[in-house]
Image (spheres, rainbow, N blue to C red):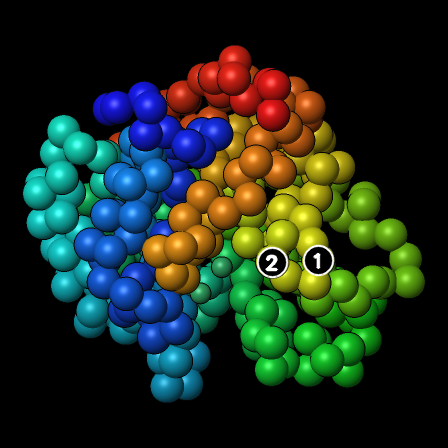
Amino acid sequence: MNKEKTNISFPVDYHIHTILCNHAGSSMEAYIKKAVSMGFQEICFLDHLTLGEPGNRFSMTPEEVPLYFNAVQMLKRRYVGVINIKVGLEIDFNPFYVDLLQKITESYAFDVIGSSLHFPGWIDVVSRKSEWSRGEKDSDYIYGIYIESLDKMLDQSYFDIVCHIDLVKKFGGNPSRSFENDFDCIIEKIGRKKLAVEVNTSGYIHPAKEAYPSFDILTKCCKSGVEITIGSDAHDPESIGQHYDKVLPLILQAGYKQISVFTQRKRSGIPLPAGCRNL
Ligand SMILES: [Zn+2]
Ligand SMILES: [Zn+2]
């Protein structure tokens, strides 16, 4: 890898979408080319699999999973020696589809599986067109449902990473009481299950204006021995590595010395370079 080309502060991005989810642009190879041009050493496609959502507007279908998996494998081989390409899924937790989800994750040699809550209890907390985004839902109620769903999600064992753990803050609707203790219990459960938490930089472009998770949650995760991955949640090639400059000093300040990567569901750590400390 040509070091001079590297203009990003940590050369790994573990959350990249593809055109298969119906709301991301460009070809898979366009993301790869952009990552290579920025000096990335490893990227992971982590595209949506959301079951039970009418119309599959935000996700590939289960029938498209082999197509997705094989397309990334082909690109992985094409770019050997240039960039490491990993393949995973960002699965929406849905208690009614747990068996099918488990089966899908076991049917392919995925590198990593992430789990998300975009629709806890069938409430949309992610779309700009949602009632939650417009402030038309009771914040305490939504936070309550979100935490309850997170807790239930953590009873499952088909995934390795908790994606954007505090996504519920996306639109800035604050609850009237603190949910700190609730998140503490969640972090403790994640620690017990030895799952990783994702540091997702897309929060900087949302009304939340900070990464997922918050610095407070990140610090507690570190204290509880919870490992982290890092990802931009890119839905277009230009967003790869977005806002890493802002989040890396926070990751170091929280106490982390390394960031996790995965190969066929096995975790290893890449040390944070000393250079990050000077950002
Ligand atoms: Zn998406
Ligand atoms: Zn997501």
Left or right: residue 184 compared with residue 70 = right
| Residue kind at label 2, given as amino acid type | Ile
Name of the residue lying farthest toward the front:
4
In the picture, which quadrant includes the C terminus?
A: top right
- Front-lying residue, 246 or 266: 246
| Residue on which the image places disc 1 | 208
Q: Which residue is drawn at 84% across and 63% down?
A: 175
Helix, strand or loop for disc 2? helix
Q: Which residue is drawn at 52% across and 17% down?
A: 275
Helix, strand or loop for disc 1? loop
| Residue on which the image places disc 2 | 205
Name of the residue lying farthest toward the bottom:
55
Left or right: residue 156 compared with residue 279 = left
Q: Which residue is drawn at 63% across and 47% down?
A: 211
Task: Tell which tag, 1 or 2, sits nearer the viewer.
Answer: 2
Picture coordinates of residue 89, whole percent (x, y): 34, 54
Picture coordinates of residue 194, whole percent (x, y): 50, 31
Left or right: residue 78 compared with residue 243 = left
Picture coordinates of residue 53, whole percent (x, y): 43, 79
Mark 2 closeness class: few <14, some 14–19, many ≥20 residues within 10 Å: few
